Image (cartoon, helix red, strand yellow):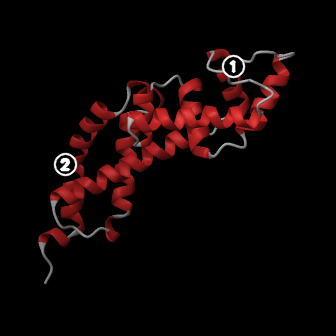
Amino acid sequence: MSTKQDEPQYLEEKIVAMLDELRDELCRDMAPSLQLRMSVEDVVQDVSVRSLQGLANFEYRSDAALLGWLRTIARNIVRSAIRRHCAVPNERLAEALLESGALRPSQLTARAEAVGALKQHLAQLDSRHQRVLQMKYVENLSFAEIGRATSRSDGAVRRLHHKALRRLGSLFGSASRFFS
C-alpha cells in the first residue's frame, strides 16, 4: 500500500518548500568571500536539479531527513566548486606565497629561480596542503573561512597550513633556509 509520502509529486513539493530554508542557511553560513565566487542562488538551483534527479533513489522517512539530504547535496556542490576553483596552476600559488612574506628566502639569486623551485616543490605536496595554501595565499581567505569551506575546525586548518609550510621547507632542504 502506497502512502502519500511515497508519491514523487508530494516529495517534489516538499523539496520546493525546503529550498527557501536552505537558501537562508547558505546565506548565513557561506563565507562572504565564497559568496562572491559562487552565488547562493546558483547553489540552490543546483540542489533543486540534483535532488529532483535523485528523488527515485531517496527513501523518505521524515522532513528532517529530507532537509538533511538537501544540505548534503548543497555541501557537496560547494566543496566541488571550491576544489575546481583551487585547482589553479602552482605558479600563481608560488607567486602569492613569495609576495605574502610567509616565506622568507634568505639568499635568492633570482625570483624566477625561486618560483620555479617552489612550483616544483608545491607539486610534491598532497592536494590538501596545496588547497589550504591556495585558499590562504591566493584567495586570501582567513583560517576560519577555509575551515568552513573545507568542513574543518579553525585549529585543524592552522595545523594543516603549518604542516604544508614545514613540508615545503623540508623539500627545499636544510641548506636552503628558504622557510626560516
First reached walking from the N terminus: tag 2 or tag 1: 2
Image position of 117 with respect to 102: above or below? below
Residue most extreme to the front: 174
Binning the other alpha carbons within 10 Å of mark 2 as few (below 14), some (14 to 19) or many (20 upward) gives few
As helix, strand or loop, the secondary structure at mark 2 comes to: helix
Q: Position of residue 102 (x, y in %)?
A: 61, 20
Q: Nearer the viewer, mark 2 or mark 1?
A: 1
**Residue labelled with disc 2:** 17
The residue drawn where x is 34% and y is 70% is 57
Residue 89 seen in render: no
Going 30% across and 67% down the picture, which residue do you hit? 58
Q: Is residue 128 left or right of residue 75?
A: right
Say which quarter of the image contains residue 86: top right
Identify the residue at image location x=59%, y=25%: 138
Image quadrant in which you'd find residue 178? top right
* Vertical order, 53 against 26 (above or below): below
Q: Is residue 88 left or right of residue 26?
A: right
Q: x, y (%) of residue 68?
A: 26, 54
The residue that disc 1 covers is 98
Q: Quadrant of the C terminus?
A: top right
Instruction: Residue 32: give x, y in percent of width and height.
Output: 38, 25
The three-letter code of the residue at mark 1 reads Leu
Residue flagged by tag 2: what amino acid is it?
Answer: Ala
State the SS at label 1.
helix
- Residue found 24% across the figure and 35% down from its top: 24
Q: Residues within 10 Å of mark 1 (few under 14, many from 20)?
A: some
Front-most of residues 110 and 8: 110
Identify which residue, 64 or 143, lies in the foreground: 143
